[in-house]
Image: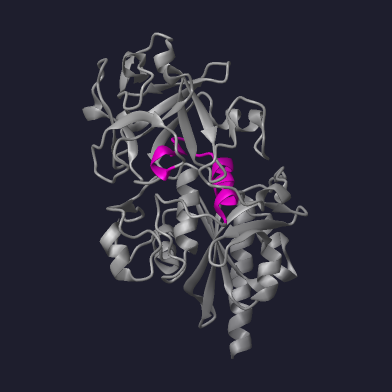
Amino acid sequence: MKNEIAKYVYFVLMIIIVISLTLYPTQVKAYENIDVSTLTEEKDPGEIIGFLGDTPQTRITSSDVVYHIMNKSFFIKNAYSGQYLDVYNGNTTSYTNVQQWPYNGGSNQRWYINYNGDGTFTFYSEVGNNMVLDINEYDPNNGANVQIFESNGSIAQKFKIGYTSSSTYVIVTQASNFTKAISTANSGCTAGENVHQYDYAGLWSERWILDPVEKDVELGALYATDNYNTYVQAYPNLSNNGGDCTNFVSQCMLASGIHYNGNWNILRKNGNYTDITSNAQLNDSWSVSDPSPWISAEEFKNFWVGRVSGAYKGTGQQIIDNPSLIWNLPITQGCVVQRADKFLGDVGKATHSMYITGYLNNNTYLLTYHSNNTLSKSLLEFCEQDPNSYYLFYVF
């Protein structure tokens, strides 16, 4: 009886795959140009290791990063509070204050990053009226206020963007002769907290995450490879409280331009607990639904399976026996893979979440994940270790 059920399930899976291949033509998948040896070096996640537009010092080439950031729009999120660079009340006049505020998706939180061609950038607010990020009166001192002002090309409106090994960015001001950076005024979590310039000390509150308005899966992959062994403090570290894999995958998705959606969100409430060891600590310091698709593999499955553009499944053994079953589907870098238990011959509870960061040998995917922290592991290798589980693939 069990053999008959297994044959039936396999037959249904093959029909689904054939239909999918009819709807989606086979595509050529480009290889990722990643020098893995440079990714294993331990660096201070707050150290500025280069500036966009300058001579590259790491695996990130100048042209690669500038290409992904210049002349595109971003939500700019504080790497500590998780709140966004925000134009007060969406005002469109000069001298309007800039603050941090929880995500709302509005034009007052969207910034068009214009590359000036000389290593500096200008941040145009999408509130309109030619308003840009500006240091009040081009003041070079600590505490100078950050505001919007009509674009005039002055040093008050030009910035360098430093990058760190954690895919967080430091916005350094030309008004200070590039000696100071934009940060929240009190390194806190209060909505409406002011933003100013100050000496850079490597604090998380002095760094920013660039969430693209339009999807860019390579930025998601970059975030994943940078942080496979790092914990950005805009999010909790759940390694010692049930596992951090889904929390990590959710971060990568956000970094690729998939934005907060219903209960799929999280926000720091205070600085009491970052490394979480109990649900009580999580609830004390973080605003998150219970149960949460942001942090629970099973809830992630239940939330996203009906919202994605494509969802596919196969057992580890099926993938080992015929890798093309999955390879020929529209699954690419930036998609999510989950391992799930088998229950009555079908998909049971999801137990692990992983992010596709690249490709291997033109027939399988490279998976990066937390719990246990792993960089670029072959899907086929994963299936060989657990051939009886189901593997779920989400195309966003």
Q: From the viewer's perspective, is 32 left or right of 69?
A: right
> Coloring scheme of the render?
one colour
Q: Residue at x 61, y 49 (%)?
A: 333
Identify the magenta region. Answer: 203-228
Q: Give the residue at the far left of this rendering.
A: 89
Please determine whether, in this image, residue 20 is positioned above or below residue 75. below
Is residue 217 inside the magenta stretch? yes
Front residue of this view, candidates 10 and 75: 75
Front residue of this view, candidates 151 and 1: 151
Please determine whether, in this image, residue 15 is positioned above or below residue 206. below
Is residue 138 inside the magenta stretch? no
Q: Residue at x 50, y 50 (%)?
A: 252
Q: Position of residue 362 (x, y in %)?
A: 76, 52
Residue 317 visible here: no
Q: Position of residue 370 (x, y in %)?
A: 54, 62
Q: Position of residue 391 (x, y in %)?
A: 58, 67
Residue 258 visible here: yes
Q: Give the residue at the far bottom of this rendering.
A: 1
Q: Position of residue 292 (x, y in %)?
A: 35, 63
Q: Quadrant of the N terminus?
A: bottom right
Q: Residue at x 61, y 85 (%)?
A: 4
